[in-house]
Image (cartoon, coloured by chain):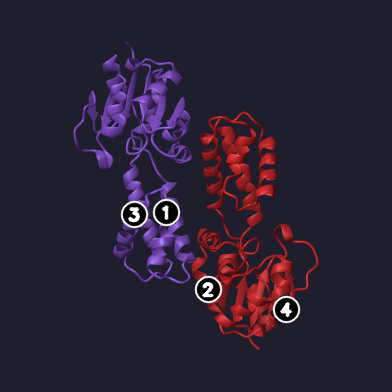
Chain colours: A red, B purple
Amino acid sequence: MPIKDIFFDIDDTLFPSSEFAELARRNAVRAMIEMGLGETQEKLHSMLIKIIAKKGSNYHNHFNDLCAALKLKKSSRYVAAAIAAYHNTKTSILPYPEIPRMLLKLKEDGYGIYVATNGDAIKQWDKLIRLGIEHYFEDVFVSEEMGEEKSPSFFRKVLKQIKAKPEECIMIGDREASDIVPAKRVGIITIRVRRGKHAKGKSTALFDVNNLEKLPLIIKKIK
Amino acid sequence: MPIKDIFFDIDDTLFPSSEFAELARRNAVRAMIEMGLGETQEKLHSMLIKIIAKKGSNYHNHFNDLCAALKLKKSSRYVAAAIAAYHNTKTSILPYPEIPRMLLKLKEDGYGIYVATNGDAIKQWDKLIRLGIEHYFEDVFVSEEMGEEKSPSFFRKVLKQIKAKPEECIMIGDREASDIVPAKRVGIITIRVRRGKHAKGKSTALFDVNNLEKLPLIIKKIK
């Protein structure tokens, strides 16, 4: 049966999410020092990492907590500097270099392309917009709006909504547990991209690739 | 007595705040339409203005409310597009063209320069950082941290903190009620910049100017 629809994960599949997150933290710490904070980059970075590990990455007051831990009195200048540098980095994200031309080729080849991602809907849309690829996708399925994270039932809902059969679809992602296993369970063809912090480890995907440059060719082969 | 210290308001004094706010709203509305929303710019803009008037400008869900009023089902794409365009504009603010060189001249002339502003401390610091002028100021006095908006008592606290006499100081701002009247009340010399949405109306300042290009000369005249 010919392939009709292709689903993409976002983070570490379409852009180097982990790299930009790390760069954003480092730039935030550097901006605090540039604003006059007399601490080392290493110390501030390691304190920040601990706060993020404790409070989660969707917590909004990492830098306030960091300043509180340092017992700073007039901290708004440092918090503002850190947030500005952090946001500047997060809003300057770029796709992996092959992505825009590869997506355009898939559109030219007549496939329906979709996003299937875990996370906050507005944040995930923001990434697509910042990456400049928001218009390529027929639709975007985000766990927050679907009522559950990527799972067999998530993918069943997606197939029902776009009226597709699993064997006509491909799911592409970097994570075995959330991208490959649940899609495979419902009969969707799977491709694992080995990059980012989840690059290593066992894969049960039909194909493993290091990047998505040859995706249009691979899909033709599946046909 | 020679002038020693100079206090500046931020919004519509150091940069065209009202203009950028209006541009940010227009860009947000245009981004929603580019994302596929089938409404006119005029309609969306006027709905947005009403929501801001009702909820205040520090409210965080203007675009969610706008989408709710339009009864949109999958609204995250429009909210994300609007927020990204809005933030892109708000983070691209520029000072009035004479400001950076004028501030540098005042530093060369040996004055202490300060900010005295109403608002949220982190937001006001963010503006100084985005404007690229954050390092010029000896200190920044924001109402949130001072415990009250600009008033005679606000300025008395500032004078005490920097150990200055009122007649050695100048306050520069665009608003009669919050910049000129309270500073004058404690004996600080006042200069009113007539620009932005509060450009018109009665002034009781010692000097009225249209821009701050000649400020270093005016201050020497006061000496």
Q: CA distance from mark 2 to mark 4?
A: 22 Å
Of helix, strand and loop, which one carries label 4?
Answer: helix
Residue ranking furthest to the left: B202
Q: CA distance from mark 3 to mark 4?
A: 50 Å
Q: Is residue A123 left or right of residue B186?
A: right
Amino acid identity at mark 1: Tyr
Amino acid identity at mark 3: Lys
Of helix, strand and loop, which one carries label 3?
Answer: helix
Nearer to us of marks 3 and 4 is: 3
Which mark is drawn over residue A185?
4
Of helix, strand and loop, which one carries label 1?
Answer: helix
Name the one closer to the observer, A99 or A200: A200
Measured as percent of width and height from the top left, residue A151 is found at: 68, 73
Query: Disc 4: which chain?
Result: A
Kindly indicate the quadrant of the structure image that contains residue B86.
bottom left
Amino acid identity at mark 2: Asp
* Residue designated by label 3: B54
Q: CA distance from mark 1 to mark 4?
A: 41 Å
Query: Disc 2: which chain?
Result: A
Measured as percent of width and height from the top left, residue A131 is found at: 54, 60
Which mark is drawn over residue B86?
1
